[in-house]
Amino acid sequence: MNFGGMVGRELARAEKRTAVYRRMQREAAARPGSVSVQTPNGAVWMSLIEVALYDAMHREGLSPFPQFYIHGYYVDFAFPDV
């Protein structure tokens, strides 16, 4: 088995995910009403409705991960430990 090739492909996938995430955040930052929210994983740009939902989840004692990558998609919020 060619582990070097597997590692290279995984690194390429990770770089692509990072590039997509950065593009999504640039686009979100440019939208009217979008705000930067400080999260445990760093600042994330969110719409006003996402901020309201994020704050409501925190008030209920939940700890969502915003903009979480799952099988080729970024979801607004996830609970990967559940």
Image (cartoon, rainbow, N blue to C red):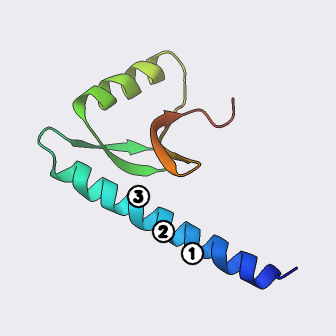
**Measured along the vertical axis of the image, is residue 62 above or below residue 81?**
above
| Residue 16 coordinates in the image, percent (x, y) | 48, 68
Please tell me how crowded label 3 is: few (under 14), some (14-19), or many (20+) other residues with Cα within 10 Å. Answer: some
Q: Can you tell which mark lies on residue 12? A: 1
Q: Is residue 27 left or right of residue 50?
A: left
Disc 1/disc 2 C-alpha distance (Å):
6 Å
> Looking at the image, which residue is at 49% across and 62% down?
17
Q: Which residue is mark 3?
A: 21
**Measured along the vertical axis of the image, is residue 41 above or below residue 18?**
above
Please tell me how crowded label 1 is: few (under 14), some (14-19), or many (20+) other residues with Cα within 10 Å. Answer: few
**Measured along the vertical axis of the image, is residue 50 above or below residue 34?**
above
**Measured along the vertical axis of the image, is residue 31 above or below residue 48?**
below
Say which amino acid is labelled 3: Tyr
* Front-lying residue, 14 or 65: 14
Asked if labels 3 and 2 touch by Cβ distance under 8 angstroms, the answer is: no
Would you say residue 40 is visible in this rendering?
Answer: no
Name of the residue lying farthest toward the top: 60
| Residue 50 coordinates in the image, percent (x, y) | 32, 30
Q: Secondary structure at mark 2?
A: helix
Q: Secondary structure at mark 1?
A: helix
Quadrant position of the C terminus in the picture = top right
> Looking at the image, which residue is at 40% across and 61% down?
20
